[in-house]
Image (spheres, grey):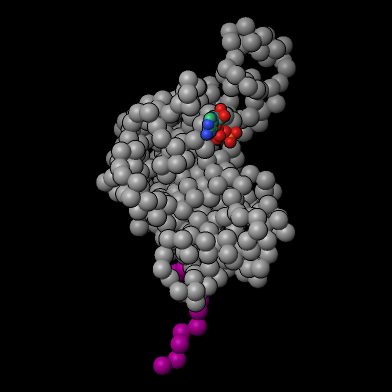
Amino acid sequence: MGVEVSVENLTKSFGSQNIWRDVSLTLPEGEVSALLGPSGTGKSVFLKTLIGLLHPEQGSVVIDGTDITQCSAKELYEIRKLFGVLFQDGALFGSMSLFDNIAFPLREHTKKKEDEIRKIVMDKMELVGLAGAEDKLPGEISGGMRKRAGLARALVLDPQIILCDEPDSGLDPVRTAYISQLLIDINAEIDATILVVTHNINIARTIPDNIGMLFRKELVMFGPREQLLTSEQPVVKQFLSGDRFGPIGMSEEKDESVAAAEAAMQAAGIAGGGTQDDFSEIIPQVKPNPGMPVRQAAIRHRANVEAMLPTLPPRAQEAIRASMAAEDARAADDEAAAMSVLETAPIPQI
Ligand SMILES: Nc1ncnc2c1ncn2[C@@H]1O[C@H](COP(=O)(O)OP(=O)(O)OP(=O)(O)O)[C@@H](O)[C@H]1O
């Protein structure tokens, strides 16, 4: 079962360069959350701070009752065992076979015997579709396979919290869909708390229960996915549509003169290249594959969201009600389909 990760007033700088400040959010136990934000806003730094690889100047990260920003090295070592982390590039050891890479955390952190290790590694390799590739070196396989190997390694210690830094980067849309489905299936199976950093809008629309966004050194928002997807905030709308006109610039923040020049271009009918998709039209969240358990986190998430509904903006409330109604209708259809299969099935002779 996943654990809640509670972040309060977290601030991180490198020397005089502040990365973000006063970040507060709670990753609810077992739920899937996504963190969005323009390049360089410190999403990877945030993940590394959650596992205690980087030290914030202020604030707390409470995991399972322990504030990892204050605890001893020994406590941190124990807390880290709760995590499975998929780094951006897979972070595999180039000279080790995939088998040894995936076995590494088991050999480092447990006293398991080699035959037990072999069984766990083979199970996880099969789960991520890498059975048969045990002897390959990371340099001999594709980027997508390296991602999946990184994910298998992140899973071997049965983590309660899984952090994925851009699981889709470098993958084609189909492989991205596979890895997204895999994350939802894993969530259904082990109920781990998952945080995914991504630039992929399709993932953001269909995978997480909650979405947050970092911009201008702050957490712009964090809440149910419908809240961000229906947001009227210019930065959110620009990010989702991928338009060059708006508060997000190529490198630094835009000043007023640039904003005025953009407004003039838009008035003259020049397009910013963004998609015209309507993100406030919520598309259904990806469900676990048939045969997988029901996502317990989805049930808890719904109860949480129902409780917080009155506090959310009207557009978010409307979208949440609509997606709940669509979900109920889908569940009723699934049940009717199951019943009709039963009705038409031959009655067994006793
Ligand atoms: N160890 C470090 N020492 C100094 N500066 C760092 C360190 N790690 C990251 N930074 C700086 O922190 C900022 C945020 O980097 P980070 O990689 O977290 O951004 P990001 O939002 O994940 O970007 P992207 O979407 O491009 O992956 C960058 O300016 C980076 O140079």
Which of the 4 image quadrants contains residue 145? Answer: bottom right
Residue extending farthest left: 65
Q: Is residue 345 magenta?
A: yes
Task: Kindly tell me whether residue 284 is visible in this rendering.
Answer: no
In the displayed structure, 237 sits above or below 88; it is: above
- Ligand 1: give its quadrant: top right
Task: Kindly tell me whether residue 258 is visible in this rendering.
Answer: yes
- Percent coordinates x, y for residue 84 in the rendering: 46, 53
- The residue lying at 59 percent from left, 58 percent from top is 149
In the displayed structure, 153 sits above or below 243; it is: below
Which of the 4 image quadrants contains residue 112? Answer: bottom left
- Magenta stretch, residue numbers: 337-350
Q: Would residue 107 appear left or right of 160 to someone viewing this image?
A: right
Q: Would residue 299 appear left or right of 147 to someone viewing this image?
A: left
Quarter containing the N terminus? bottom left
Q: Would residue 333 appear left or right of 79 to someone viewing this image?
A: right
Q: Is residue 138 magenta?
A: no
- Percent coordinates x, y for residue 113 in the rendering: 45, 74
Q: Would residue 11 appear left or right of 183 to someone viewing this image?
A: left
- The residue lying at 43 percent from left, 28 percent from top is 12
Q: Nearer the viewer, residue 24 or 304?
A: 24
- Percent coordinates x, y for residue 292 in the rendering: 47, 65
Q: Nearer the viewer, residue 205 or 52?
A: 52
Q: Nearer the viewer, residue 224 or 63?
A: 63
- Percent coordinates x, y for residue 199 in the rendering: 59, 37
Quarter containing the C terminus? bottom left
Q: How many marks do you count on the picture?
A: 0
